[in-house]
Amino acid sequence: MAKTPKNRPENAAAPVNVICMKWGTKYGPEYVNRLYRGVTRHLSRPHRFVCFTDDATGIDPRVEIRALPSLGLPPGPERGWLKLATFASTLADLEGVTLFLDVDVIITGSLDVFFEPAGPFYIMRDFNPRSDKVGNSSVYRFVIGAHPSVLSDFVADFEKVKREHRNEQEYLTAAVERLGVLDYWPADWAVSYKKRCIPKFPKSLWTKPAKPVDTRIVIFHGNPKPEEAMIGTGNKWYRPALAAPWVREAWYGDESG
């Protein structure tokens, strides 16, 4: 039997999962709803869209809701550690290949490519050049239940892990690398809005933010958030930026759809 080419999925028609997490009050239900609509517009293969949350109020009824998983540990300095719960041996009623997305991202192109490369785990490289050997956990793809040690090792010695790693994505990268399954997608597929789209000062004063040609996901870590980027406000004084109409188009899409 012929082998599947390295850069193609084993079964292009197999259903996949796209999941996100929302907790607390930092992000409202509109973030989940717009992420759902963006995924629906830009992912052609069969999929489930599931949000793990502690409050489903206002979330589109077409989004599958599951209870926010628990690490069973005291609250940490960063709630992002909760993402590690996705590596449990079971995750609600899901199975198979799964793409995790933070809720503060916008979808600007086809997501099909994120499921194409062979391999059990993919993640974006972090956007900080000083940590280019660390993945950015805003976007990662994994197989549910395939690597439960990522979670169990953290729970077994979480105080040591937190001392040695600044955040969950630094630990996640190290843990997956130890398993020998760490892979990175091309850098342009998912980018930081403030680091890749906003021109450097002073060019940012007269040049609008632009989306790299092959980008499919734009990540809004820190500030500005999508609502601010589309009108050109909410930036740091040392990082001024003009309005980005393409952000508005991707953020709102067809609100009636």
Image (cartoon, rainbow, N blue to C red):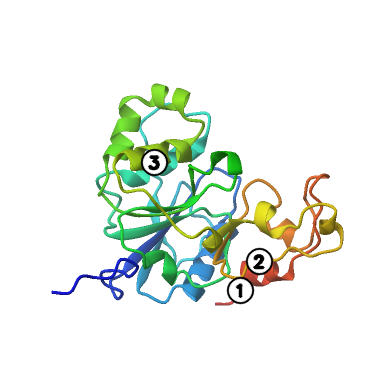
Q: Which residue is mark 2?
A: 211
Q: Which residue is mark 3?
A: 84
Residue at image coords 79%, 59%: 232
In this orientation, which residue lies closer to the viewer: 183 or 246?
183
Of badges 2 and 1, nearer the viewer stands 2
Task: Give amino acid for label 1.
Answer: Glu
Circle 1 crowding by C-alpha within 10 Å: few under 14, some 14–19, many from 20: few
Task: Check whether the beta carbons of the residues at disc 1 and disc 3 lie within 8 A of each other.
Answer: no
Vertical comparison of 172 with 208: above or below: above
- Give the spatial CA distance, label 3 vs label 2: 30 Å
In the rendered image, residue 168, in percent from the top left (x then y), is placed at 46, 37
Mark 3: secondary structure: helix
- Give the spatial CA distance, label 2 vs label 1: 22 Å
Task: Give amino acid for label 2.
Answer: Lys
Q: How many marks?
A: 3
Q: Earlier in the sequence, mark 3 or mark 2?
A: 3
Residue at image coords 71%, 52%: 224
Q: Earlier in the sequence, mark 2 or mark 1?
A: 2
Of badges 1 and 3, nearer the viewer stands 3
Q: Which residue is mark 1?
A: 255
In this orientation, which residue lies closer to the viewer: 41 or 57?
41
Circle 3 crowding by C-alpha within 10 Å: few under 14, some 14–19, many from 20: many
In the rendered image, residue 22, in percent from the top left (x then y), is placed at 50, 49
In this orientation, which residue lies closer to the viewer: 88 or 174?
174
In this orientation, which residue lies closer to the viewer: 115 or 50?
115
In the rendered image, residue 115, in percent from the top left (x then y), is placed at 38, 66
Mark 2: secondary structure: loop
